[in-house]
Image (tube, rainbow, N blue to C red):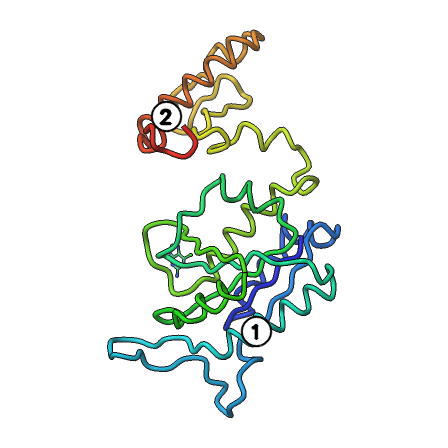
């Protein structure tokens, strides 16, 4: 998978070198390129923003550097992947559609994603119109109902969620099957040895006896009940009929 990130803060993406993603990169499963949007400015101050037309607080990202950046990155990607390759362009944006496990699953089979990190109040609307008119596939993705200063943290989160689903990245593929959100439920509670543990306050805490029974059918049924009751308590919204996974 080829991943391009266009940002004003390339250093913010340094964690992608580490851990799981770094391993996927070293093994050639992920090819990551990070670009500074200011490469596509032409004035002495490398200006990427201006005041909002119509007035209002804050600054708006100018359209020209973005249009040039997309053209250049698209060309670089097509030089590598072939002229017929087209990216999915993702704008992290609190006003976008909620990024969920189903989104991560879908995007994990993509050949090429370009992340465009906005800062300030947002990007000039005509950038989106231009990309849509040019036939590009565009997605606005939100991490949840709160506001961050820019898209960089969202790119870290989205990239980790997507890349770990690429076959071969997570060593044990089975560990992806039963985790939280894989079936629209939260994960059941986990226990390990010692089965009988005396906590620091002297309270003896036993793991549920059923987990020591060796009866895999009953264990699976117990875990499913636990997953459902935990979801009902913590995230009743996931159980509503309208919800994507239920
Ligand atoms: Cl994707 N971007 C920003 N700036 N804030 C957010 C977000 C994204 N998701 C939740 N809050």
Counting from the top left corner in percent of width and height, residue 206 is at 45, 16
Q: Is residue 6 left or right of residue 122?
A: right
Answer left or right for 216 relative to 51: right
Q: What residue lies at 45% left-to-right and 76% top-to-bottom?
A: 63
Q: Nearer the viewer, residue 14 or 242?
A: 242
- Within 10 Å of disc 2 (Cα), the crowding (few <14, some 14-19, many 20+) is some
| Closer to the camera in the image, 48 or 14 | 48
Kindly indicate whether the residue at mark 2 contacts the one at mark 1 (C-beta within 8 angstroms).
no
How many numbered circles does the render carry? Answer: 2
Quarter of the image where one finds residue 34? bottom right
Q: Badge 1: few (under 14), some or many (20 or more) residues near its Cα, within 10 Å?
A: many
Which residue sits at x=49%, y=39%?
Answer: 102
Q: Earlier in the sequence, mark 1 or mark 2?
A: 1
Which of the two marks, 1 or 2, is nearer to us in this view? 1
Cα distance between the residues tagged 1 and 2: 46 Å
Check mark 1 vs ligand 1: CB closer than 8 Å? yes or no. no
Label 1 sits on a secondary structure element that is helix
Does the numbered disc 2 mark a residue whose Cβ is under 8 Å from ligand 1? no
Tag 1 residue? 69
Of helix, strand and loop, which one carries label 2?
Answer: helix
Q: Is residue 110 above or below residue 185?
A: below
In percent of width and height, residue 10 lies at 56, 69
- Judged from the image, the quadrant occupied by ligand 1 is bottom left
Q: Which residue is mark 2?
A: 230
Report x, y in % for residue 99.
44, 47
Q: Is residue 233 left or right of residue 225?
A: left
């Amino acid at each position: 998978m080829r991943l391009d990130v266009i940002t004003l803060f390339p250093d913010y993406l340094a964690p992608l070198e580490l851990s799981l993603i770094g391993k996927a990169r070293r093994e050639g499963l992920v090819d990551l390129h990070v670009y500074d949007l200011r490469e596509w400015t032409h004035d002495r101050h490398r200006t990427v923003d201006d005041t909002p037309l119509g007035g209002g607080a804050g600054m708006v990202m100018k359209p020209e550097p973005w249009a040039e950046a997309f053209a250049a990155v698209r060309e670089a990607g097509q030089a590598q992947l072939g002229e017929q390759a087209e990216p999915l362009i993702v704008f992290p944006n609190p006003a976008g559609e909620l990024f969920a496990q189903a989104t991560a699953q879908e995007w994990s089979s993509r050949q090429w994603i370009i992340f465009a990190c906005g800062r300030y109040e947002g990007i000039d609307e005509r950038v989106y119109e231009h990309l849509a008119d040019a036939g590009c596939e565009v997605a606005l993705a939100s991490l949840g109902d709160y506001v961050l200063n820019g898209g960089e943290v969202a790119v870290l989160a989205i990239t980790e969620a997507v890349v770990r689903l690429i076959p071969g990245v997570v060593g044990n593929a089975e560990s992806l099957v039963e985790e939280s959100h894989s079936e629209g439920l939260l994960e059941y509670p986990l226990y390990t040895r010692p089965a009988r543990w005396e906590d620091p306050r002297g309270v003896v805490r036993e793991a549920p006896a059923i987990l020591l029974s060796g009866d895999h059918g009953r264990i699976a049924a117990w875990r499913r009940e636990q997953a459902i009751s935990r979801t009902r308590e913590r995230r009743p919204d996931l159980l509503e009929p309208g919800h994507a996974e239920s």
